[in-house]
Image (tube, rainbow, N blue to C red):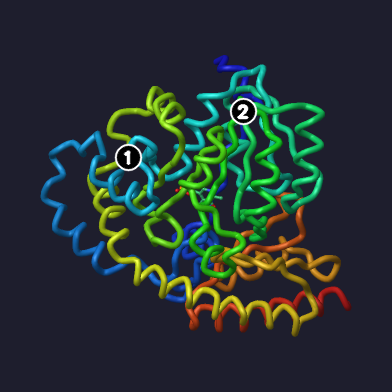
């Protein structure tokens, strides 16, 4: 059967490996498996959110509130914007889809960093548009600027901080760049990890209200999947000028998130204390990864997120490290597919990380032995 031609150039997204697969394929006991491949919050969901979800479980025969009034109000309050500036998506992934469909067709161009969030390219290809990437792995605004000057772009993606590498541009530098972008180019500022970056270094903090006021051609994306520990709920949002939001509403399917996903977001916003505690622990534990990398003589990318990218240069092959860890029940993300010899490890709980170091010790020793044979 023939399908839409643009799909010939589309790849299927490969999510982090699920726990069930490791049980099945490697016979590891389920309780021994550590999943640090999808940047989930390892401390679980706030108990207040769980309680609310349990209460609501009886209402599932009713459609969700399609106006999403309460969640939009809560976000508008948090970020000091109007609820007309907010759109809710099934994860911020869905907002990325809306943004691209709103701007792109087969004659359009998208500009992004070489090694960045995979969904930009995946949704981009569905429109048949041209995808331009800067040369460096990490975000380099000089390269963004020169490529933009040379080729132009309908949409530019800035992932701040960047997944899967963890680096983050300073707000000042971002603003300076945005000042040079044409007002008809839509710039997406993906803030999936902004809560972490803001905690670590105020120079990285992007304030969505300030952003869209100064640069009306931008949209800020946020998610409940990471710091707010709601990956399973699929709740994300976009903040932009009303004309952009209204256009995206034309693309939004009705009831695009569930009653439970809405309630989870609303409750999660009431428990900022939980989120802040998780973030503080995240950076305490991240220090241990940095020290571990130094002690083993390989490098890492300074991270402003809840994960760290360990680079093996020519010491080890990242796919071998990842595979050997997997067989021991530790699931991490190998970045070979991104053209980088590195693994991305979500920062786990203290106990999980201690086990990761032990397993890594074993794996690295074994790989060295093989090499020396
Ligand atoms: C996780 C993530 C998202 C969105 O996740 P959702 O679960 O769809 O909200 C968006 N951008 C980046 C960079 C991410 O890492």
Distance Cα–Cα, label 1 vs label 2: 23 Å
Q: Residue furthest top?
A: 2
N-term mark: 1 or 2? 1
Q: Is 295 situated above or below 319?
A: below
Percent x, y for residue 69?
24, 40
Left or right, 47 with reference to 166? left
User: Which residue is more in the foreground, 69 or 257?
Assistant: 69
Say which quarter of the image contains residue 67. top left
**Residue that mark 2 sits on:** 183
Quarter of the image that includes the C terminus = bottom right
Percent x, y for residue 57?
16, 52
Say which quarter of the image contains residue 82. top left
Q: Residue at x 69, y 56 (%)?
A: 335
User: Which residue is more in the foreground, 147 or 213?
Assistant: 213
At mark 2, the secondary structure is loop
Q: Is 96 situated above or below 210?
A: above
Quarter of the image that includes the N terminus = top right
Q: Residue furthest front?
A: 214
**Residue that mark 1 sits on:** 83
Q: Residue at x 29, y 29 (%)?
A: 254
User: Which residue is more in the foreground, 340 or 103?
Assistant: 103
Say which quarter of the image contains residue 105. top right
Q: How many marks?
A: 2
User: Which residue is more in the foreground, 219 or 314?
Assistant: 219
Percent x, y for residue 334?
66, 59
Left or right, 71 with reference to 109? left
Cβ(mark 1) to ligand 1 < 8 Å?
no
Q: Residue at x 55, y 61 (%)?
A: 37
Q: Residue furthest right?
A: 372
């Amino acid at each position: 059967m023939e399908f839409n031609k643009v799909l010939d150039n589309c790849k299927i997204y490969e999510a982090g490996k699920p726990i069930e697969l490791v049980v099945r394929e490697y016979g590891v006991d389920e309780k021994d498996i550590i999943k640090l491949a999808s940047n989930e919050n390892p401390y679980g969901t706030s108990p207040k959110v769980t309680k609310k979800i349990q209460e609501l479980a009886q209402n599932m025969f009713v459609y969700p509130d399609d106006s999403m009034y309460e969640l939009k109000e809560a976000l508008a309050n948090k970020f000091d914007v109007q609820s007309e500036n907010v759109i809710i998506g099934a994860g911020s992934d869905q907002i990325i889809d809306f943004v691209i469909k709103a701007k792109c067709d087969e004659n359009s161009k998208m500009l992004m960093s070489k090694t960045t969030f995979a969904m930009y390219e995946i949704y981009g290809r569905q429109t048949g548009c041209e995808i331009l990437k800067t040369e460096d792995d990490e975000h380099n605004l000089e390269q963004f600027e020169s490529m933009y000057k040379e080729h132009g772009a309908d949409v530019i993606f800035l992932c701040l901080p960047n997944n899967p590498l963890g680096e983050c541009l300073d707000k000042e530098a971002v603003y300076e760049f945005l000042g040079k972008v044409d007002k008809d180019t839509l710039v997406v500022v993906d803030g999936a990890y902004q809560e972490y970056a803001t905690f670590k270094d105020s120079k990285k903090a992007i304030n969505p209200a300030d952003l869209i006021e100064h640069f009306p051609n931008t949209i800020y994306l946020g998610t409940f999947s990471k710091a707010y520990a709601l990956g399973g709920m699929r709740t994300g949002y976009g903040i932009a000028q009303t004309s952009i939001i209204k256009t995206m509403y034309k693309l939004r399917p009705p009831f695009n998130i569930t009653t439970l996903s809405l309630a989870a977001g609303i409750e999660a916003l009431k428990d900022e204390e939980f989120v802040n505690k998780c973030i503080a622990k995240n950076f305490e534990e991240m220090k241990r990864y940095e020290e571990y990398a130094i002690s083993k003589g390989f490098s890492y990318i300074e991270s402003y997120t809840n994960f760290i990218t360990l680079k093996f240069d020519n010491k080890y092959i990242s796919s071998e490290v990842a595979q050997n860890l997997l067989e021991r029940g530790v699931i991490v993300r190998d970045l070979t597919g991104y053209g980088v010899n590195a693994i991305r490890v979500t920062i786990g709980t203290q106990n999980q990380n201690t086990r990761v170091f032990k397993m890594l010790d074993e794996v690295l020793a074994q790989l060295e032995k093989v090499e020396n044979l």
